[in-house]
Amino acid sequence: MTRSFPADFLWGTATSAHQTEGDNTNADFWVEEHVEGSPYVERSGDAIDHFRRYRDDIALLAGLGLKSYRFSIEWARVEPREGEFSEQALAHYRDVVDTCLAHGLEPFVTLHHFSSPRWLMGLGGWHGERTPALFARYVEAVMRRMDGRVRRVVTLNECNIGVLLRSLFQKLAFVPPVGVDVASWKAPGWRTAAAAECGTTLERYCNFKMAGDEKGVATIAAAHRAAREAIRRVAPGVQVGLSLALSQVQALPGGEANAAQAWYGNFQQWLPVIAGDDFFGLQNYTREIYGPAGQSAPPAEAERTQMGYEFAPESLGAVARAVARETALPILVTENGIATDDDARRVAFIDRALAGLHAAIDDGVPVIGYTYWSAFDNFEWVFGYAKRFGLVAVDRATQQRLVKPSAHHYAAIVQANAVPEGAEAQPQPGPARALPAGVRFTPPKAPPAVVFANVQVFDGSGAPSFAGEVRVEGNRIVAVARASEGAGVPREGARVVDGAGATVMPGLVEGHAHLTWPTSVEKFVPGMQLPPEELAITAVRNARILLDHGFTSAYSAGALSKRLEIVLRDQIESGGVPGPRLIPSSVEREPPSDGSFIDAGEVDEHGVGPDNVRAFVKGCADIGARAVKFLLSGESALKAGASLEVLYTDEEIRAAGEQAQASDVWLTGHAHASEAIKMGVRHGFRVLYHCTYADEEALDMLEAARDRIFVGPSIGIIQATLDADPPPHFDMTHMKQDAAIVLERQKALVPELRRRGIRLVPGGDYGFPFNPHGRNARDLALWVEHFGYTPAEALHAATALGGEIMGRGDELGRIAPGYLADLLLVDGDPTADVAILQDKQRLKAIMKDGRFHKAPEAQQ
Ligand code: BGC
């Protein structure tokens, strides 16, 4: 019995511009390939020279009898500089289309296939507010030029690639669909360089494959809609769709919720975006299996492809069925294929995939075409040229094309328009099964908009508060109004909180946090060391305590465990644990101590010598620390005179600096001694604490580095030492003497640093038995008392400058439209009396990332 496909079934094969054309020098991916430390195993270079050889290549594909050729147009070529369109590039692509038509191949155009112009990164990339409109403008220019010659377009290839990679790097359980070398990808010094090369910073760098968060998805969705609208306007009649990478999703017993979440992220969340499209572009390569702990490896007996994926051709039919259950759009398989050097496995893959697809069509799934990826062996992104998906091999030394047997096999299928004789879908190995009906992931509901009305607004800038209103939508502040200007903020759909004259201000930033230092206002711990279980839970508790006291961000100054803060940060970010935004730090080396007062805990040392220090920094970066802490000087509080000792050689700290740059982590230093400060500045430290004995030269160096450096005087611990009233068996005499000296010096030092324009941030080493977490806001009052700050100036340091130390000065620490909604509603006026912030009862509401950690009491 012949198993025929529908009469007008669109048979084709595909490529993308960056992977085949060569010399795509203006694209972000080109930059990533070329920067130092790039994880790309090789560069795309002249690729397979398709930009020049397209005529022969198209003739070759047509000669095989295929019906369509899917290729992409390179935005970076068409619009090499923002707003400047290249006539030459447009003419080129028009000719590609014409060549297809001349050979009887339907040109199937992808308008964006992963790579973007590098200038787009400077405008925020796929987080940029203007990106949807810029994309639509480019699409319009292309479509006008195509002048009715193209029947179908994919706006954006694999809109969910960022979602996929993001969940991959969160779980790191598996091999990603585009093939990423995980180790080098995670050591992202190269990314800083790529960002700079594209005219942006690491924090703002967001290319297409990185846009998997809420903002990225929203930007891509808006770009698709804007492009579709432009196409409908300038090229009516063209069928528009997007494509998604969809593995077949299966669950092991207990893994249903994880599987449902993956399916939601990759597919269901896009349903509103494709509503209104003409077709759905399905790209499938394998299946994904989810267990209770997340994605799990394929069954041991399963065959793997060159990409490391399970050889699972039956996934195609299964995923087409799953898609058809949720959308009525016609399904066009825009990619399906296998990377292998064994061409017979390619033949088997195609046969079995098509057998499964045909069975789905038989059961009513509306599949209208199939596109094999790829026409040619080509540049497989990070993996370079070694992963061979092509029907046609390319000898890159000569650029000769060699048609593989699988190409002839596929061509015969196309001719017959039927599943080949004997091709059968096979049962998939292992116990994993499709999701049972009814299991569905429910995404957390976006909180309703909130309007704070009848409030005084302290916006973080240091300017006086003003009467006004603030509106929050999602996790951002969207509007701020001044009563003096008459109008309020819009109130549609918002919960209105009547502040009754209370102050709204940005959440506080603790600039010197040690969440693993155990003591808090809730629990006294008479020492520093805890067994691992207590340590972990105590750190979690301390994170919550900080947030309870209005600290919505914390910059860690070191931890008593290697990974704890990193894990804690992830738990906080995923919403599972209340706590501040956290810059997690490395383990802190045990400071020299005479043991008389406090045992500072036994912490792995990293050994001596530049190589050990280098390895330590790299090790911290590899496990996900954002900051690495060094005790550049000792600490007199723990050992008499130690503050004036420098604990490292210059070579060691140079090595730390170099490695930090390569691994893209920040360096943080405990530095009392002048020479320790200088060493830190010399070797690129970003944060230096104490700086007590800075001499003139150190001050000059700090001043010269003021654009990149922050200083934390850490006065909280000093005052706490002076105030402490320890039990008789704790002799703090010597500590108190030292604290008195430090306080006197800092009273002169801090105003001088400030005069020189150096950014100073509050934060006071809380967590010692006599300086508990939860008392953090006391720093602000101490700044007023000892350093000559006004309350508003101290608040500016703890909010706006706090946002800067967190590396997010453009979106954190102020009240202004676009800023993250980390807000406090304070009963009273902290700009008159900053001490009120020490009373958590005065915090009527605490909002972090647009959600109430402490909601204001319901109003009548
Ligand atoms: C992409 C292609 C890629 C292919 C194989 C898809 O994710 O669209 O560019 O080469 O998969 O990994």
Image: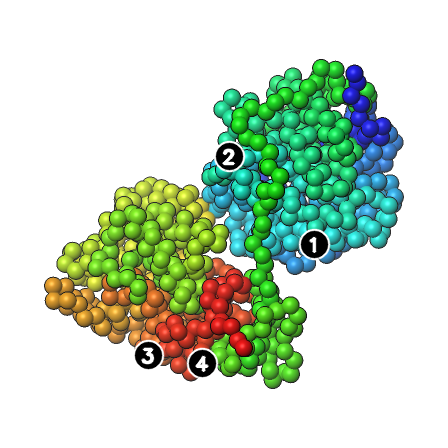
Write down the quadrant of residue 837 in the picture. bottom left
- Alpha carbon of mark 2 to alpha carbon of mark 4: how far? 56 Å
- Alpha carbon of mark 4 to alpha carbon of mark 3: how far? 17 Å
Amino acid type of the residue that numbered disc 4 sits on in the rendered structure: Asp
Task: Name the N-terminal-most of marks 2 and 3.
Answer: 2
Residue 303 image point, x, y percent = 55, 22
| Quadrant that contains the C terminus | bottom right
- Alpha carbon of mark 1 to alpha carbon of mark 4: how far? 41 Å
- Disc number placed over residue 166 in the picture, else none: none
Residue beneath disc 4: 829
The mark closer to the camera, 4 or 3, is: 4
Amino acid type of the residue that numbered disc 3 sits on in the rendered structure: Glu
Residue 203 image point, x, y percent = 53, 55
| Colour scheme in use | rainbow
Q: Which element type, helix, strand or loop, lies under badge 2?
A: loop
- Alpha carbon of mark 1 to alpha carbon of mark 3: how far? 51 Å
Left or right of residue 181: residue 326: right
Task: Name the N-terminal-most of marks 2 and 4.
Answer: 2
The answer to which of 690 and 417 lies nearer the viewer is: 417
